[in-house]
Amino acid sequence: MAVELNHIIVPAYDKHASAKFLADILGIEVGPAWGPFVAMPLSNGVTLDFMDAQQFHAQHCAFQLSDPEFDAAVERIRAAEVPHWADPFHQRPGEVDNRFGGRAVYFEDPAGHNLEILTPGSLPAGG
């Protein structure tokens, strides 16, 4: 049997605001709200289901984009004046990381989750 990730529940202080924030950065649409969730479907069939919560631990999610999609997302981040970094520890502000032949940028969503956009080749082989 093939195992595939279907969905991840993403806790947020305001599920609508967090879903819209990320969808706007990625240049995609937020799906419909259903039950306690606001869904954001991704092109590989995985859905991020945002849910209101008051207590949670911040998570890390990384989104692989093509080079043109990455460039557009970085422009949206900068246009919205969203703080961003070239590293997951937020020590290189305003930079884009160039590693392993790819690029990456880290930023936080309104709930404090540490999000990453990256291009193919930005992880070491097997990573």
Image (cartoon, helix red, strand yellow):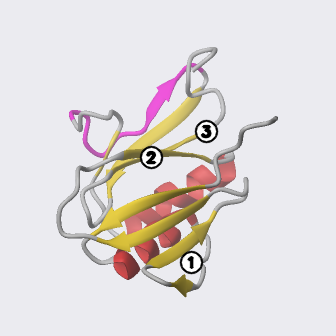
Look at the image and say whether residue 78 sits in the magenta stretch. no
In the image, which disc is placed on residue 97? none
For the residue marked with disc 2, what is the amino acid? Cys
Please name the residue that numbered disc 1 is placed on: 30
**Residue ID at (26%, 64%):** 111
Of circles 3 and 1, the one toward us is 1
Label 3 and label 2: CA atoms lie apart by: 14 Å
Magenta stretch bounds: 91-100
For the residue marked with disc 1, what is the amino acid? Val
For the residue marked with disc 3, what is the amino acid? Thr
Badge 2 marks a residue whose secondary structure is strand
**Residue ID at (64%, 54%):** 6
In the image, which disc is placed on residue 119? 3
Disc 3 and disc 2 in contact, CB within 8 angstroms? no
In primary-sequence order, the first of circles 3 and 1 is 1
The residue nearer to you, when weighing 93 against 49, is: 49
| Quadrant in which the C terminus appears | top right
Q: Which SS does the magenta portion mostly show?
A: loop
Badge 1 marks a residue whose secondary structure is loop
The residue nearer to you, when weighing 113 against 37, is: 37
Disc 1 and disc 2 in contact, CB within 8 angstroms? no
Badge 3 marks a residue whose secondary structure is loop
Q: Residues within 10 Å of mark 1 (few under 14, many from 20)?
A: some
Please name the residue that numbered disc 2 is placed on: 61
**Residue ID at (17%, 62%):** 55
Label 3 and label 1: CA atoms lie apart by: 22 Å
Quarter-wise, where is residue 14 in the image?
bottom left
Q: Is residue 5 above or below residue 87?
A: below
Q: Residues within 10 Å of mark 3 (few under 14, many from 20)?
A: many
